[in-house]
Amino acid sequence: MKTFVSVFVGMLFAASCISCHSSKENIGDFPVEKEIDYCRAQATLTLFSLPSTDKIPNSVDRGSSSWHYTQVGSWTCGFWPGILWYLYEDTRDSLWEKSARKVSDLILPLAYEKAHSHDSGFIMMTSLGNGYRLTGDLSYKAALLSAADSLAKLYNPKVGTILSWPGMVQEKNWPHNTIVDNMMNLELLFWAARNGGDKRLYDIAVRHAETTMRYQFRPDYSCYHVAVYDTIDGHFIKGVTHQGLSDDSMWARGQAWAIYGYTMVYRETGDPRFLDFARKVSNVYLKCLPADMIPYWDFAAQEFSSVEPRDASAAAITASALLELSTYVADADSAAFYRNQAVAMLENLSSPDYQAGAQNSAFLLHSVGHMNKNVEVDASISYADYYYLEALIRLKRLEKGCSVVTGL
Ligand code: GLY
């Protein structure tokens, strides 16, 4: 299987190079360059507003124009350097590379510490992962390999998943908890396994994806935010929520992580079970969207009131994922369907209703961080901006006939 997989991944990247100049997709008249220019202009304002280079912009409250900063080690600390890396990828302007390096270098020592939660995948892949992909810097590679080994220490073979939140074991009495967001962090394990790390990391990532597929989804393929398992015999105890409206509801960003996560697992494995599952988790999300394709923060929230906040971050994550998914499905109609859905999301995110414009220097308004704690409600948040820019760059690559994903 693994030989097949490395061949598959190799073919993917090789195909990306060959196809890059070969054909032009018909994306319609969405002005992708203009929207990337917009992101670059906003990021320039943010960059030059920072009081010092160790400040990491994180969120802007509704109605404010001032950034809240985050610290190295928070789950969101990689998104700002990730944005800087994407701008460097798009422009090759050394301003962006230098700025991205400064923040990534602050994060790097963390890769040699114990992983305190599953979030090390988000932190490392957005900052050092993009940095290594674009520069080949071997200090980033070594750090990523170390971070992957640390993340794998949270794996419980009895359960078959990574323990997402060690801090919640006692606090919530969730003996082994796995949140759907954790699907995203398997990318670090896959990356390490094909970049000189322990091959066991690949097996852990696959087993985590399989176990999550089996227990963390309802019959309609919507997900529980948190799956709780027994540590002794590994059995599934219950599915609950932490950031959603209720245990039985579909928290929008959680479902977006599932869409992105299973698409990425298919990219890394070539296993058709994961492609099929990525389509199923996408379809339930798409079926339940409101007319403008930007979900309420939880799909059940819209039943109570149409003035509930939207979550632009979920839309940006999903748009980026669907662009990738569209390149894997075999039949042309389905491919066009996923691509057009993604473009429609990007069109709406790029409207004055959702772009921050002159209100603040983030890219987007209207995301929800943690509704149940009343934190970052209807705010601008760095991860919404990161996936919005990623989706725009992916779309630009598709328009050129390139693979949406490039990588080392
Ligand atoms: N991973 C945390 C969140 O999506 O809010």
Image (spheres, grey):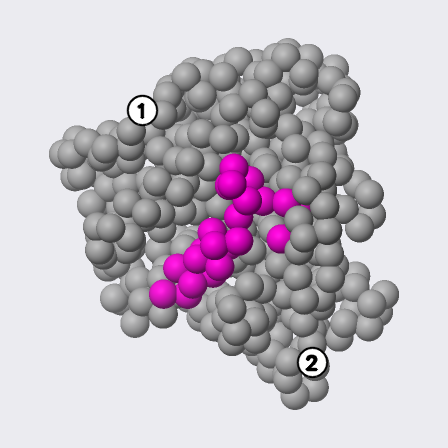
Q: Which residues are magenta?
A: 276-299
Q: Amino acid at mark 1?
A: Asp
User: Label 2 near label 1: C-beta < 8 Å?
Assistant: no
Identify the secondary structure beneath mark 2: strand
Residue at image location 67% in from the left, 18% down from the top: 360
Q: Nearer the viewer, mark 1 or mark 2?
A: 1
Labelled disc at residue 237: 2
On the rendered image, what quadrant is the C terminus found in?
top left
Nearer to me, 168 or 242: 242
> 145 or 387, which is in the foreground?
387
Task: Tell me if 2 is positioned left or right of 290 in this view.
Answer: left
Sequence-first disc among 1 and 2:
1
Q: Is residue 217 magenta?
A: no
Tell whether position 278 is magenta: yes
Residue 69 in which image quadrant: top right
Q: Position of residue 173 (x, y in %)?
A: 82, 72
Q: Looking at the image, can residue 47 be seen?
A: no
> Residue shown at 22%/55% (left/top)?
331
Q: Position of residue 305 (x, y in %)?
A: 72, 46
Amino acid type, label 2: Ile
The outermost residue toward the left is: 22
Residue 203 percent across, percent down from the top left: 44, 70
Dot 1: few (<14), some (14–19), or many (≥20) neighbours within 10 Å? few
User: Which residue bears the numbered disc 1?
Assistant: 29
Instruction: From the viewer's side, name the closer residue of 182 and 313.
Output: 313
How far separated are the C-alphas under marks 1 and 2?
49 Å
- The structure residue drawn at horizontal position 16% and vertical position 39%, both measured from the top left corner, is 18
Q: Quadrant location of the N terminus?
A: bottom left
